[in-house]
Image (cartoon, rainbow, N blue to C red):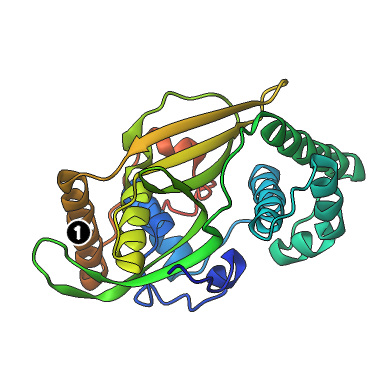
Amino acid sequence: MISTAPDRNGVQERSSDVWSYISPSRLNIWLKCPVAFKLRYIDGIRSPTTPSLFLGKAVHAGLECYYRHKQVGTELEANDVVLRLDACWEALLAEDNMTFTSTSDETKLKQQAAVLIGAYLSQLSEEPTPMAVETTLQEPLVDLFTGEDLGIPLLGVVDLIVPSENGAVVVDFKTAAKSGPPTEKVHEVQLSAYSYLYRATTQQTESGLQIRSLVKTKTPKIEYREYPTRTESQLRRFFQIVRAYLDDLDRGRFVHRPGFGCTMCEFSDGTCDEF
């Protein structure tokens, strides 16, 4: 059985000690640049939440509201979801200490969230009652191939788990600025982490995984990306990544990886220049 633990915000407020848990987001930031990982998770340097990130959080909140009602047999219309999002808007702002340069900017972003949610719900085909919604899963990391307990838990927040004819499908929502190719490698760490968590929690194998992207184009697009159940080679690679990550933490080794990603890094203002 899948039980609901603290929500996404609860996860963010947990101990900042990097040895308290591993998460897909921590692994992905470390893979992109260990220095950026050190600045955020060890030195505690956090950049202000951007409007783009806050939009993603607002959309997630709206979809969570819709699916939690669906779990108990209530189908909300898009307008109902937007009204509920509006009611919790100030609380969302406070959680992220989010500010806007003008009331007009805030209004536009709120409208954009409403449009994306409406587009998603209008294109949503009938699906069964969710098994889990916005659920925090945490399990000890035990190497599937050696049986070694790595001494640290894996933690992830799964947006949605829905049943299918062949078993459960694990779903993640994303907001994106533009359409992108269905490149599995981009999401591999997250997909493998969610697969491990689902299997460890339920003692069952997922039937597949999905990423549902709400694309912020002038006319919003909703893209479903289907990914098959994780293979042995993908899970083996996941544990290789985890071991390399833990080795860097053990040694206190954080190598700067300059490249194209630096142009989109939150520390591109020169914070990382000393490394």
Measuring 44% from the left and 40% from the top, which residue is drawn there? 210
Measuring 25% from the left and 61% from the top, which residue is drawn there? 245
Q: Amino acid at mark 1?
A: Ala
Measuring 82% from the left and 46% from the top, which residue is drawn there? 82
Relative image position of residue 9 (x, y in whole percent): 61, 67
Q: Out of 268 and 104, give the one closest to the viewer.
A: 104
Secondary structure at numbered mark 1: helix
Q: Quadrant of residue 257?
A: top left
Q: Out of 151 and 74, give the one closest to the viewer.
A: 74
Measuring 17% from the left and 55% from the top, which residue is drawn there? 240
Residue sticking out furthest to the top: 219
Q: In this orientation, does residue 34 appear?
A: no
Relative image position of residue 119 (x, y in whole percent): 71, 31
Relative image position of residue 161 (x, y in whole percent): 49, 53
Specify whether 75 is left or right of 200.
right
Compared with 118, 91 (above or below) is: below
Q: In this orientation, does residue 1 appear?
A: yes
Relative image position of residue 76 (x, y in whole percent): 78, 47
Please tell me how crowded label 1 is: few (under 14), some (14-19), or many (20+) other residues with Cα within 10 Å.
Answer: few
Specify whether 107 is left or right of 120.
right
Q: Out of 14 and 153, give the one closest to the viewer.
A: 153
Residue where numbered disc 1 is placed:
244
Q: Out of 73 and 256, give the one closest to the viewer.
A: 73
